[in-house]
Amino acid sequence: MQYAILQCHCLHGLFRLLYKQPSVLKGRTNVVTVTPWLAPIVWEGTFNPLIVDSIYKPMHLSIATTVFAVGKYVRFLRDFLETAEKHFMVDFKVHYYIFTDRREDVPAVVLAPGRNVTIIPVPGSNRWQEISSRRMEMIQTAIENQIGKEADYIFCLDVDTKFHGRWGAETLSRLVATIHPGYYEQTHEHYPYERRPASRAYIPAGEGDYYYGGATIAGYVRDVHKLTKYCREQLEADAANSIEAAWQEESHLNRYLLYNKPTKILSPEYLWQDFKAKNNEVQIIRFSQVNKNYAEVRPNVKKRK
Ligand code: UD2
């Protein structure tokens, strides 16, 4: 009953929400819930969804959500959209921007009132690395052309994923990054940062905070615009020097976030991988990458982390 509304009524024009008193002494003890620069790390048990919703829902925010479904990845769209409608920013205005080269294969999914889809045609490619990386440039351009005029916040998400639990307004902040589920138990010398000084994504040995996944980036539209523009420029500078960072745009993202600290961090509850067994820290899996046959869905070589 931790989150139950005990009473809710209007008193002298003020909407009162009564709930169990928060404690400054008792809370999550098996995970770290704040970074050294005082950004929250969002885990189950660190927030009360009723309070969060009571703050954010009356704001009538517009949430842009970009998702790329290029080539065979269009097959992941139905599950992504159907599960998003059940769990992602429920009761908020959500505008999905689907970037695809296969418009005719985009499934018709029933959306809740206030939620809609725009399809943005993009070219295909015979290199998955290029498809993944080019997202930075395309998101930057879409923000400049359209999203910047329409939305308050933006989420940029991988498509080969499903939502399994609440993903709500607790994830809103100026610049939001998600801890990659593959590396959160490791120290930074084991992260797959780009370590070659010749690349613009270079992070010297001895430096690092967390390893962030490229699958979820979010924040105010203007802050995500700055991030995508930066990563796009660095990717282009690398390409001009015939170098590709270890994990393409994810490597540039990690460098950006090391020197431009996120204001909120989502725990691996918000980015899991289906092949990984759940563990004690992760009390709920909210969003997870599905198992996929890399050799079958990607246009070129298989590779996985
Ligand atoms: C990781 C990241 C991913 C990206 C990539 C490095 C996680 C969990 N995932 O995933 O975000 O940073 O490493 O480049 O952090 N796509 C297509 N068609 C394709 C290939 C890719 O539409 O043929 C899109 C699609 O939206 C997909 C995304 O690009 O979800 C990332 O590609 P991926 O899922 O194959 O990358 P992966 O699994 O290595």
Image (cartoon, grey):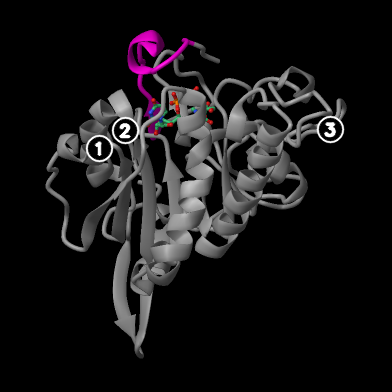
Q: Give the Cα separation between the discs numbered 1 and 3.
A: 37 Å
Identify whether 265 is placed above or below 60: above
Q: Is residue 291 magenta?
A: yes
Q: Earlier in the sequence, mark 1 or mark 3?
A: 1
Q: Position of residue 231 (x, y in %)?
A: 63, 44
Residue drawn at 84 percent across, 32 percent down: 207
Q: Which residues are magenta?
A: 286-302
Q: Residues within 10 Å of mark 1 (few under 14, many from 20)?
A: some
196 vs 239, left or right, is right
Identify whether 142 is placed above or below 160: below
Q: Earlier in the sequence, mark 1 or mark 2?
A: 1
Q: Earlier in the sequence, mark 3 or mark 2?
A: 2
Q: Position of residue 276 (x, y in %)?
A: 46, 14
Q: Secondary structure at mark 3?
A: loop
Q: Can you identify the residue that label 2 sits on? A: 164
The kind of residue on which mark 1 rests is: Thr
